[in-house]
Image (tube, grey):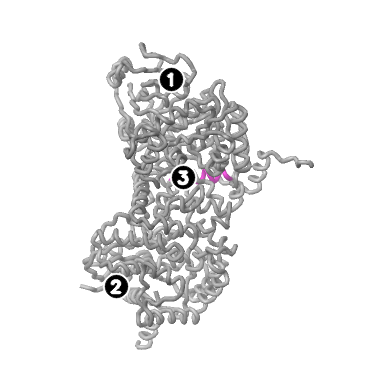
């Protein structure tokens, strides 16, 4: 996101400032280590785990506009020695949407985004962080954090999809290990959104959107992708 | 050449399990979940019909004969394991092949389960001809509505442990398959239809 | 490219067919969703089922002995098979004892695992798979592509053609009703002429010695009740302690598998028919090995419902045969690496770790977590799917070092700005076959942040 989608990070930063937070971006940060760990190399990621803890242990909250990174820190940093610093970082690392609703407890946003939007439920955020109830579960509260935040945005309409929470097909190294299925899954997701009239697809994870955008661009489909942080920070009329 | 005496597999397997099994995990007490439906008979009928069965309610057992002949022509071979049906072939032999060619088999159901339309029978209700409900082209099961329970939890509670019956089965409809392109076909290898006659 | 990916590439060449396969299985998932919504206590049932199974595994030796004792008391003959070979030998010995040359078999993934059919055929035994889907693939000499819906990958035209050849149905006939009727007559004759019948076991009840078989077609019972000798092959993990526990499992199984509230037949076999024989074969074949793995032992809770396959977006778009295992899909991908890490270690990578399988599993196996954990083991073992270990180590060090990380990122972005579309690295080529790379912005977030901090 730092290199290729800075606008999503900028929107996150500006939004948090707007909501009265004291926000810092530790410039020495690198990566949560998820890509290597998911590829099977937890051992090789240890360095980045420790670096992450060092970088962030002094903060009250660590907010990331990325469900998969947050999931990785909270769930897979269990392989580190659970020092006080590690425990604190794991507990205080939150996805942007979690932070907005559970910590700041906002009930409104001064956001305007008059477009038809398709919500893509990124898997790690959905089933890992329970940002919403996945469609497989029964009799659980239907609350969806992304849904709730988008409903605060003036002018925005959400389209109704055929498959509300099917995976986009990125999956980290999966995208190059199984390229045919990866692309097919992405194509199918895009078709679902596009056929329901979505002008833009949004999600809480840039990796999903990057993958979908790659297909959209190649196939020249008239639909865009945008990170949810940009919508929540938008004042477009 | 001497062959080493191989430990019987039972010992090998049990030894390996003892070495590899996890620490004791407690066995839960499963509550007897009941159905939320207030009218179990209505739910029973609804689920049976949804699954492709027919249901016919009678006011008393004397009407059963009439119901059968309404649904099935009399010139076809019928076999009944019910003690009280006159004029219909009963169980005369235990040779299962003898029952090939049975058009309609009539048996008694002991317990009905509303949530899934299943009916329980044991070999006692089959005249000890275990193949009877499967080999017939059509099946009729007679059950009292008093014996309808809501869920499988209630059914197994009512059943308790087996005593002497060596075979029992829950039957929840006519045999079926969707193995060809997910197209539902009613009447696979067993009965092509199930008619449930509900008595008071 | 790993074998699964190669097969998936071939599968996806026919996009219309992939869409058809995907839609068929998604439909089964939707039926499952409707069926489970009818049970408000569904999530509690899953928890109970998981606990019952874990408890049983923690006392599996005691329960197996109790089961054997009860079964013998009932009049059944109990055999123990350490592996597939022993299982097959036992089946053959029973057939030979009765001079039987013809056996009907109902659905049993365990016997698929043991390759029983091939073994028996080598010994001149005619084996007839009596489940319609199984019979179809038997005639085609193919393995099943799904553990519940073995012929889901076949179109009715293909089945029609097969039946025309083998069963002399009308040429060009594709109506499922008509084709099923033809199979019914064909199999009836087999039931009456077979000398032995074999079934799988869905649940073995430790307290009563019963074996419980759940079917829809009636073929298992037709086989068992028409032959004097019945054999039930059971994986040792199929035991549950109490008869009453069946309430939990019968409410979970069919709803998860096909969306029915229960299978048409739930048969409880306790003793042989008069003048008959009932054999139960308890099979290990790697299960005790899996039991010893703390991270993976809970995969033994599996009740073979197939829900994980129906919900898996990768399975739907690649088909069961692409896994090259007896049990494909998500559950297959956590069961088989323990059997042959070299051959099946690629399977945990055929997943995006989306977690849908974990959510549908009626016995709450944490499938996607186990996939992740298998990846660590595959990587430790230095197998190719996990990438070059040295490279990974270098990358790992790089990711932990701010200067390296930022320099690498900047280089990558600047290269893309200079040469959009002229990528040379292998992984980029794989990406760019069907996707564009992201557009590279002028400045990174770090650069923007540093600038605005300075301006402040």
Main secondary structure of the magenta stretch: helix
- Residue range corresponding to the magenta coloring: C44-57
Q: Residues within 10 Å of mark 2 (few under 14, many from 20)?
A: many
Q: Residue A176, relative to residue C364: is it above or below?
A: below
Report the label total. 3
> What residue is pinned by disc 1?
B99
In the visual, does C69 lie left or right of C432? right
- Is A56 or C181 nearer to us in this picture? C181
Query: What residue appears at the point 24 percent right and 74 percent down from the top-left corner?
Result: A235
Of discs 2 and 3, which sits in the foreground? 3
Q: Residue C428, relative to residue C181: is it above or below?
A: below
Q: Give x and y (percent) for residue C352.
A: 44, 60
**Mark 1–mark 3 distance (CA, rounded to whole Å):** 33 Å
Quadrant hosting residue A79 = bottom right
Q: Give x and y (percent) for residue A110.
A: 25, 71
User: Can residue A129 be seen here?
Assistant: yes
**Mark 1–mark 2 distance (CA, rounded to whole Å):** 76 Å
């Amino acid at each position: 996101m730092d290199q290729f989608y800075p606008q999503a990070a900028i929107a996150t930063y500006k939004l948090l400032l707007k909501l009265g937070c004291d926000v810092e971006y530790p410039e020495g940060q690198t990566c949560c280590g998820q890509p290597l760990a998911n590829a099977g190399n937890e051992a090789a990621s240890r360095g980045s785990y420790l670096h992450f803890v060092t970088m962030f242990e002094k903060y009250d909250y660590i907010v990331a506009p990325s469900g998969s990174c947050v999931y990785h820190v909270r769930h897979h940093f269990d392989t580190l020695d659970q020092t006080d610093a590690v425990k604190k970082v794991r507990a205080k690392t939150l996805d942007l949407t979690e932070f907005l609703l559970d910590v700041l407890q906002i009930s409104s946003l001064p956001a305007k985004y008059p477009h038809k939007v398709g919500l893509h439920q990124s898997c790690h955020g959905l089933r890992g962080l329970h940002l919403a109830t996945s469609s497989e579960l029964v009799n659980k509260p239907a609350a969806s954090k992304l849904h709730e935040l988008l409903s605060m945005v003036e002018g925005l309409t959400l389209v109704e999809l055929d498959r509300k929470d099917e995976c986009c097909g990125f999956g980290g190294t999966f995208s190059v290990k199984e390229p045919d299925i990866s692309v097919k899954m992405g194509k199918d997701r895009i078709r679902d959104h596009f056929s329901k009239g979505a002008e833009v697809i949004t999600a809480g994870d840039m990796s999903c959107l990057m993958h979908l955008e790659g297909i959209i661009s190649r196939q020249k489909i008239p639909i865009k992708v945008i990170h949810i942080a940009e919508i929540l920070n938008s004042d477009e009329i | 050449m001497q062959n080493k005496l191989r430990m019987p597999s039972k010992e090998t397997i049990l030894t390996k399990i003892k070495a590899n099994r996890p620490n004791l995990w407690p066995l839960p007490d499963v509550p007897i979940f009941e159905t939320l439906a207030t009218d179990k008979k209505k739910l029973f009928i609804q689920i049976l019909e949804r699954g492709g069965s027919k249901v016919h309610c009678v006011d008393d057992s004397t009407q059963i004969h009439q119901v059968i002949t309404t649904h099935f022509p009399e010139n076809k071979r019928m076999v009944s394991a019910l003690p009280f049906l006159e004029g219909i072939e009963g169980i005369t032999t235990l040779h299962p092949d003898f029952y090939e060619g049975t058009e309609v088999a009539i048996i008694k159901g002991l317990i009905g389960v509303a949530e899934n339309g299943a009916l329980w029978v044991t070999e006692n209700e089959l005249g000890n001809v275990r193949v009877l409900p499967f080999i017939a082209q059509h099946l009729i099961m007679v059950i009292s509505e008093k014996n309808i329970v809501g869920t499988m939890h209630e059914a197994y509670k009512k059943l308790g442990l087996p005593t002497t019956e060596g075979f029992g089965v829950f039957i929840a409809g006519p045999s079926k398959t969707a193995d060809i392109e997910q197209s539902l076909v009613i009447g696979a290898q067993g009965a092509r239809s199930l008619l449930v006659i509900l008595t008071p | 490219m790993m074998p699964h990916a190669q097969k998936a590439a071939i599968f996806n060449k026919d996009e219309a067919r992939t869409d058809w396969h995907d839609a068929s299985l998604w439909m089964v998932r939707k039926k499952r969703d409707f069926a489970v919504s009818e049970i408000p206590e569904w999530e509690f049932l899953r928890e109970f089922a998981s606990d019952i199974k874990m408890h049983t595994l923690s006392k599996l030796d005691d329960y197996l002995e109790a089961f054997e004792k009860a079964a013998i008391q009932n009049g059944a003959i109990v055999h123990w098979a350490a592996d597939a070979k022993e299982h097959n030998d036992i089946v053959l010995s029973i057939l030979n004892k009765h001079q039987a040359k013809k056996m009907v078999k109902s659905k049993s993934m365990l016997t698929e695992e043991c390759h029983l059919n091939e073994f028996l055929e080598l010994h001149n035994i005619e084996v007839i798979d009596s489940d319609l889907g199984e019979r179809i693939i038997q005639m085609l000499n193919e393995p099943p592509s799904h553990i519940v819906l073995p012929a889901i990958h076949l179109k009715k035209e293909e089945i029609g053609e097969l039946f025309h050849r083998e069963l002399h149905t009308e040429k060009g006939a594709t109506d499922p009703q008509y084709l099923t009727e033809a199979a019914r007559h064909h199999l009836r004759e087999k039931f009456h002429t077979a000398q032995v019948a074999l079934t799988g076991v869905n649940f073995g009840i430790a307290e009563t010695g019963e074996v419980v078989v759940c079917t829809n077609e009636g073929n298992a019972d037709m086989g068992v009740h028409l032959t004097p000798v019945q054999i039930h092959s059971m994986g040792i993990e199929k035991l549950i302690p109490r008869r009453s526990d069946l309430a939990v499992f019968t409410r979970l199984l069919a709803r998860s598998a096909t969306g029915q509230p229960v299978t048409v037949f739930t048969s409880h076999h306790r003793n042989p028919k008069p003048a008959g024989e009932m054999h139960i074969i308890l099979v290990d074949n790697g299960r005790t090995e899996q039991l010893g793995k703390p991270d993976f032992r809970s995969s033994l809770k599996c009740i073979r419902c197939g829900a994980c396959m129906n919900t898996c977006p990768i399975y739907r778009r690649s088909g069961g045969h692409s896994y090259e295992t007896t049990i494909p899909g998500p559950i297959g991908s956590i069961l088989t690496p323990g059997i042959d890490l070299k051959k099946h270690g690629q399977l945990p990578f055929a997943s995006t770790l989306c977690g849908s399988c974990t959510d549908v599993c009626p016995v709450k196996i944490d499938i996607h977590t186990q996939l992740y954990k298998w990846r660590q083991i595959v990587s430790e073992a230095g197998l190719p799917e996990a990438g070059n270990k040295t490279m990974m180590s270098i990358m790992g060090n790089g990711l932990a070092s701010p200067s390296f990380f930022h320099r690498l990122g900047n280089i990558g972005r600047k290269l893309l700005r200079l040469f959009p579309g002229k990528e040379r690295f292998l992984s980029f080529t794989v990406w760019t076959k069907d996707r564009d790379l992201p557009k590279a912005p002028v400045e990174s977030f770090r650069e923007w942040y540093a600038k605005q901090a300075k301006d402040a």
